[in-house]
Amino acid sequence: MTKQSTKPNILVVNDDGITAAGIKNLMEVMQEIGNVVVVAPDSPQSGMGHAITIGKPIRFDKVDLYPGVEMYKCSGTPVDCVKIAVNKIFKGKKPDLCVSGINHGLNNSINVLYSGTMSAAVEGAIEKIPSIGFSLDDFAADADFSHTKKFIKNICEQVLANGLPEGTLLNVNFPKGDNLKGIKICRQANAKWMEEFDERKDPYNRPYYWLTGVFENFDHGEDTDVWALEHGYVSIVPVQFDLTAHHAIQTLNSWNFEGSKQSKTDAKPSKVSAPDGLNLG
């Protein structure tokens, strides 16, 4: 990271790879706001979730895809890209904003758990960087992102001006098409993929399996991301990475667990080193 100015420093990442149309469009919007550094996987990494690379080297190299843009391709996952950017490119001086996407395909509802796009944004939030993931309901390589740009710029400017609550990031999804009605602040819908594995045969007549399925919405509320997108709105869901089910703690405390009463000495946190990441789980 070499640029110095009063403009905000913005990290742009994705999971579709450094040559994807979505990241090019996101980068162009960010150039209107601040100084841009792009760090993206060297190949598509969709569905990687919060995976990190352990036990093999990560490489990143500067590339010259677009004039005047500092860009790096990374051999690792979307989350690796954020870690490398913070530690090696920004050298610990964290960017003012981390944006991920624009993903080719929605990351609404349960998809947020599988998404490399959103996991990169989550990693930014873990690093205490205001972070946003952007996704469009269009898987096409030549998807039209033009109708998303004014919304992306406005959302990013609002986050830079107002900040985000600690431990929180934004999951922003766009419907396909340019007839958008506006923005809805939503909750994550109760929906999931009803999955099947289609069995096929390779040229040697050995079976292999291809994941298929349909997306089923069990949630009929009009305050969800699924409803908003189906009705032509941009959905914004505030997301947290604290996965504690706080509402269940009281219930579990009423159960009769053997040895569940901790002493004060037992409750002290401990630090465990992770040489080569081999004890990570």
Image (spheres, rainbow, N blue to C red):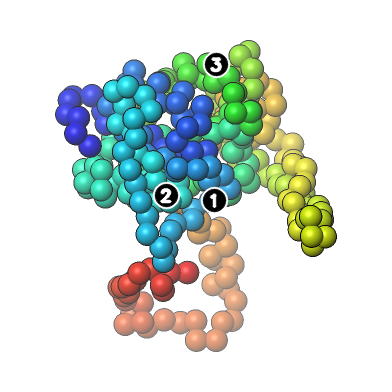
> Which residue is painted at 25% across and 48% down in the image?
88
Q: Is residue 273 left or right of residue 56?
A: left
Q: Is residue 7 left or right of residue 254?
A: left
Q: Is residue 208 above or below residue 146?
A: below
Tell me if mark 3 has few (under 14), some (14-19) or many (20+) residues whose alpha carbon lies within 10 angstroms of its own: some
In the rendered view of the protein, which quadrant contains the N terminus? Answer: top left
Q: CA distance from mark 1 to mark 3?
A: 27 Å
Q: Amino acid at mark 1?
A: Met
Q: Is residue 212 visible?
A: yes
The quadrant in which residue 269 appears is bottom left
Give the label, 1 or 3, closer to the camera. 1
Q: CA distance from mark 2 to mark 3?
A: 31 Å
Residue 62: percent from the left, percent from the top? Answer: 31, 38
Which badge, 2 or 1, is on the more N-terminal residue?
Answer: 1
Residue 153: percent from the left, percent from the top? Answer: 41, 20
Q: Is residue 10 left or right of residue 183?
A: left
Q: Is residue 92 left or right of residue 129?
A: left
> Which residue is painted at 63% across and 46% down in the image?
110
The quadrant in which residue 94 appears is top left
Helix, strand or loop for disc 3: helix
Q: Amino acid at mark 2?
A: Ser
Mark 1 — residue?
A: 48
Q: Is residue 169 visible?
A: no
Q: CA distance from mark 2 to mark 1?
A: 13 Å
Q: Is residue 281 above or below residue 127?
A: below
Give the label, 2 or 1, closer to the camera. 2
Residue 52: percent from the left, percent from the top? Answer: 44, 57
Mark 3 — residue?
A: 147
Q: Tell me, yes or no, whether the two marked residues, 1 and 3, touch with CB atoms within 8 Å.
A: no
Mark 2 — residue?
A: 75
Q: Is residue 3 above or below residue 213?
A: above
